[in-house]
Amino acid sequence: MDARVIRLEPHPAQRGDAWWAAPLLTAIALVAFVAYAVWAALQNGNYYAAPYLSPFYSPCVAARCTHVSVPLVGAWWTLSPALLVLWVPGGFRASCYYYRKAYYRSLFRSPVACAVPDAARDYRGETRFPLVLQNVHRYFFYLTLPVLAFLWWDALRAFRFADGWGLGLGTLVLCANAALLTLYCLSCNSCRHACGGHLDSFHGAPIRSRAWKIVSRLNEKHREFGWVSLASVVLADFYVRLLSVGLLNDPRLF
Ligand code: FES
């Protein structure tokens, strides 16, 4: 063997620490979320407990919705209305730069960790189909903005009860969920790019410069916003479900 050849292929023995713990926990969390989201989306019921609408079904665009946000689809749609909207936030999360790293490491094991061999020998990154399609992320960002606007609309409507304006625990749950999802969206790399990341210079663009700086600060916490908002959307849906089936009473704070 030529003495000048350096063998770069790592061996598991080079990592004596519990490198597998983070990918394992990530895999468990992601699989649990996807399983819950699919289950909730296919229920086609118990997603509305006045005045609260589950975020998994918002905006409810089918005429048959228990609570119609905007009737874009006629009564011919008999499947779950969540299927009409969930592909937008789902695609946004699935193509998120952070989540890509998370599930490439934890589910595909490619690349899994430093000094640990990949599951596949020929790592090709995102240079070929189908992973090259991850470039659609920026478009999912724009598609998500109207969905986010509807979530804020739902949060505002959560103050409106049958007996007038008020504040329930569900109001706080929906407001917190909308706020966390907003932080997740604003901290997105595509948002940062849209604000000014594509410019060569901020000369003469003070508003873009300010916006870019704010979004850049948020971007540093994108991973955290991603996980907290993932949990909040599940909790908000679960809370509305418990109210809807009568297993819980919504405490009115005033
Ligand atoms: S949502 Fe994560 S990078 Fe855009």
Image: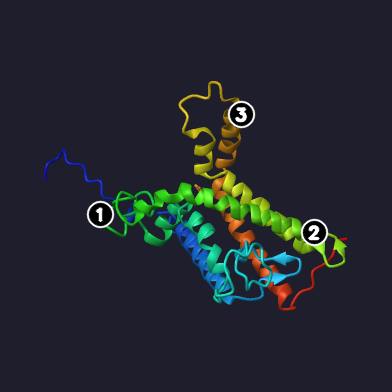
Q: Residue at x 74, y 73 (%)?
A: 243
Expressed as whole percent of the image width and height from the top left, the position of residue 233 reads 62, 61
**Mark 3 vs mark 1: in front:** 3
For the N terminus, the image quarter is top left
The three-letter code of the residue at mark 1 reads Asp
Question: Marks 3 and 1, how far apart in space?
Answer: 45 Å
Q: Residue at x 85, y 60 (%)?
A: 166
Indicate the secondary structure of the residue bearing disc 2.
loop
Disc number for residue 122:
1
Between disc 3 and disc 1, whose residue precedes? 1
Using a 10 Å C-alpha cutoff, classify the residue at mark 1 as few (fewer than 14 neighbours), some (14 to 19) or many (20 or more).
Answer: few
Location of residue 3 by image quarter:
top left
Between disc 3 and disc 2, whose residue precedes? 2
* Contact between labelled residues 1 and 3, with CB atoms less than 8 Å apart: no
The three-letter code of the residue at mark 2 reads Phe
> Which one is in front, 21 or 184?
184
Q: Please, is residue 112 above or below residue 65 in the view?
A: above
Location of residue 23 by image quarter:
bottom left
Disc number for residue 207:
3
**Mark 2 vs mark 1: in front:** 2
Q: Specify the farthest residue to the top.
A: 203
Q: Which residue is mark 2?
A: 159
* Residue 111 as seen in the image, left or right of residue 140: left
* Residue 214 as seen in the image, left or right of residue 140: right
Tell me if the residue at label 1 has its CB under 8 Å from ligand 1.
no
Expressed as whole percent of the image width and height from the top left, the position of residue 39 reads 55, 74
Q: Is residue 228 visible?
A: no
